[in-house]
Image (cartoon, rainbow, N blue to C red):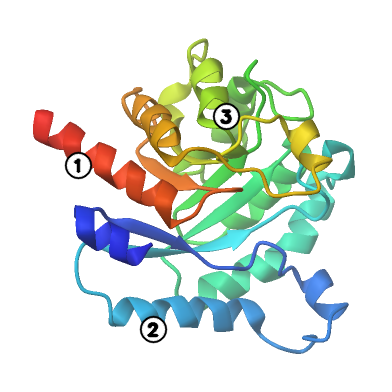
């Protein structure tokens, strides 16, 4: 991925591999007592020191407590703030550049996570799984979510992402959005299958990198999204195809 960024002269955001590394999950694992979040951040920060080329930003990644495709498993705002605060504080102390709450299916847990991130001094982003009608998986409209968080949090998110859906989903949702300029990024699935279909799939679903990149370029040309990346079913081929499209688009401009 860093080679792709160098090849096409693109800045890169590298997320720590800590989506499931809450204190509760670490305590229940064979890694209990280990500073996994700090170690993971340090690993990426040390890699960055050896990186030559465009800027690389390291973001600490935090995920929901339950299944990201099942909003009924989401925590309340208070419980979420209590659970996620320790992980967020550890990532912030490790020296990451920003924080990302990723693959969030429900308003309540995202609000609690946002409160904990707002208490740090770091830029932060909240990233949602959405449907083509512009709602989170729990049915809350994304526009309403953004407006509520921008007003209720002591320090609002720097911006919002969408992830773990096909780019066609964001394209459909943002065409009717009044807040799309606050959606600054998309980490997209390669497959156009819905979350319900993917949740029941026994095999990893992928798709053609060239078609994927065409749709991602269309997303990029909207008013909001500036950060493009891959989620389920993507690999370096999909990111390279995005790099090719962006470089060609820049030459035409």
Q: Which residue is mark 2?
A: 46
Q: Nearer the viewer, residue 14 or 180?
A: 14
Write down the residue under mark 1.
Answer: 247
Q: Is residue 28 above or below residue 190?
A: below
Q: Is residue 153 visible?
A: no
Residue 192 lies, in percent from the top left, at 61, 30
Up/down of 41 relative to 239, above or below: below
- Looking at the image, tell me whether mark 1 or mark 3 is earlier in sequence order: 3
Evaluate whether residue 181 shows in this view: yes
> Is residue 236 left or right of 30 when viewed as pictured?
left
Secondary structure of the residue carrying numbered label 3: helix
Quadrant assignment, res 182: top left
Q: Earlier in the sequence, mark 3 or mark 2?
A: 2
> Does the residue at mark 3 contact the one at mark 2 (Cβ under 8 Å)?
no
Neighbourhood count class around disc 1 (C-alpha, 10 Å): few under 14, some 14–19, many 20 upward: some
Per the image, the residue denoted by label 3 is 146
Figure check: 145 above or below 33? above
Q: Is residue 200 left or right of residue 85?
A: right
């Amino acid at each position: 991925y860093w080679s792709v960024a160098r090849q096409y002269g693109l800045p890169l955001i590298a997320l720590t591999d800590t989506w499931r590394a809450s204190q509760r999950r670490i305590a229940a694992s064979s890694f209990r007592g280990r500073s996994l979040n700090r170690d993971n951040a340090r690993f990426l920060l040390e890699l960055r020191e050896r990186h030559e080329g465009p800027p690389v930003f390291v973001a600490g990644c935090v995920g929901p407590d339950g299944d990201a495709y099942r909003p009924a498993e989401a925590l309340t705002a208070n419980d979420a703030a209590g659970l996620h605060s320790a992980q967020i504080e550890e990532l912030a102390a490790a020296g990451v550049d920003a924080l990302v709450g990723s693959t969030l299916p429900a308003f309540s847990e995202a609000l609690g996570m946002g409160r904990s991130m707002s208490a740090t001094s770091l830029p932060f982003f909240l990233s949602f799984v959405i449907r083509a009608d512009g709602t989170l998986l729990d049915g809350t409209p994304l526009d309403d979510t953004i407006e509520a968080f921008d007003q209720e949090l002591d320090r609002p998110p720097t911006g919002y992402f969408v992830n773990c859906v096909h780019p066609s989903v964001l394209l459909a949702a943002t065409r009717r959005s009044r807040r799309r300029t606050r959606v600054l990024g998309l980490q997209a699935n390669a497959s156009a299958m819905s979350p319900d279909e993917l949740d029941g799939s026994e095999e990893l679903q992928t798709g053609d990198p060239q078609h994927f990149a065409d749709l991602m370029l269309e997303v990029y040309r909207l008013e909001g999204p500036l950060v493009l990346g891959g989620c389920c079913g993507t690999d370096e081929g999909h990111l390279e195809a995005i790099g090719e499209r962006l470089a060609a688009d820049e030459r035409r401009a």
